[in-house]
Amino acid sequence: MNRGLIILAVTILILVITPYVVLSFGYGNGVVGVDARVLWDAFMDYLQGGQPGIVVITIVPVDESGSTVNGNFIVRVHNFTDYYLKPHSDLVYQGREMRLSFKVSRIPLRRGIPSGEKEPRIIYKEHEYTIFIYDWENGLRGARLVRFEPAKPLTELTVKIPVQRFTPPMPADSLSFSTSGSPEEVKTTQKWMEAVQLHSIQGVSVRFYAYEGNNLYYSQKNRELNPDYTPITDWSSTGDKATPADDTAGSPAVSDGTKKWAIVYVTYRYERWPLEHGTGGWYYLEIVTPVMFSGRGLGNSISCSLCGGSPTGSKTAYQEGTTSIERSIGPGVEAVEKSGISISFTVSYGPVSLTVELYKEATTGSGSGSPKLQITVNTWIKEWLIAFDDNTGWKIVHFTWSDTPP
């Protein structure tokens, strides 16, 4: 593309299109190092009526103590935004740059007060990328799933990626990385999995309800393979992947002290990508990612020592006579709630088995309402029904009766 046209487009973008100014006022000093092609794409998108944004990602490899790790890293970035609408993730970058920029769409969802903020504003659809880094020479690898909301035209992220040591299968100078934009194989599997804890007490019934587009969060996993499909590394987690509901439905209720898991039918997807080529053939990257969930049911029983006791964490009180009680759940906290959930795939080279995790998170996403607990009081034991979250960000809700409000 003609360099003069790019400079002209950037100049117009900076001086004329106020909402998409890409100077780093409020973000730092000087002009953010954005690829000129990204600026051009954003400019053209705007002219065609779009609402583009730009994300600038600075990648920082770190060790277990959080200290920066230097190395000669190869970077792969896969786009998992709207993953349920795609046949597989999109490989959007591969190279050695540790500071990257991408054009993103700023899609408004609703007006509200985001978690951790005090003032209402337009809430935009989140984007999700997974960044993989490899230093074959020094035997270092790492990966992290990054989720962000492009609330402003310019989003700057510093992403710290913990690295692990591994034994490289062969010298780094004998490897060449793949330029393939498609995976070698894609498979899916589905399984009923734990989703939300349902706690009831005497006189109370509780069920889980989620709208299409609401998010639960399950782990994404990855590992690397030799050319003969034997593992080079063990499965490791990149983080908590937003997993949207594919339907609007509620679970059966639990009542009068029964405590059980609400379960949902989760779709997971397996992708195997050519990673590096050596004298023995291709080395591979395997990625296993939750896609979406549907259905609502009841699973195993839960033990609880908090219900019926003194409330801890955040609290909500309902006075006798209150009807149509609903308690929104989430956003939760970024911590594992349930581990050891087994899944398996049958791929071309044989069976693949691993375990995944459920996180203590739930969000509205693109849903028409928040995920919630629907609560029915069959008998008022005392004047006040107290719901409390025990510091889980309302992902787990407990109940107790009280003569007075908290």
Image (cartoon, helix red, strand yellow):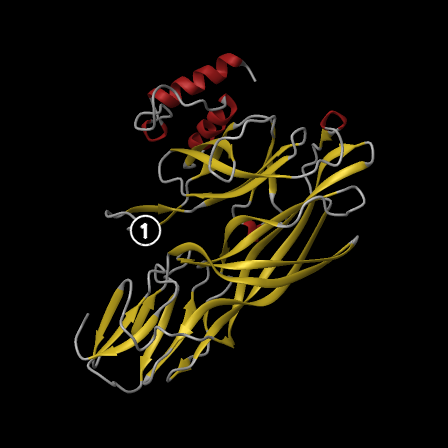
Residue nearest the observer in this picture, 53 or 332: 332
Q: Amino acid at mark 1?
A: Ser
Label 1: which secondary element:
loop
Q: Let me know if residue 177 appears in the view.
A: yes
The furthest residue to the top: 4
Query: With respect to residue 374, does 23 lie above or below?
Result: above
Q: Is residue 44 left or right of residue 117?
A: right
Quadrant occupied by the N terminus: top right
Which residue is under mark 1? Answer: 115
Q: Nearer the viewer, residue 232 or 322?
A: 232
Q: Position of residue 264 (x, y in %)?
A: 52, 68
Q: Is residue 33 above or below residue 129?
A: above
Q: Is residue 78 visible?
A: no
Instruction: Name the spot of residue 245 as percent of width and height, x first.
Output: 49, 61
Q: Residue at x 49, y 32 (%)?
A: 60
Q: Position of residue 293 (x, y in %)?
A: 53, 62
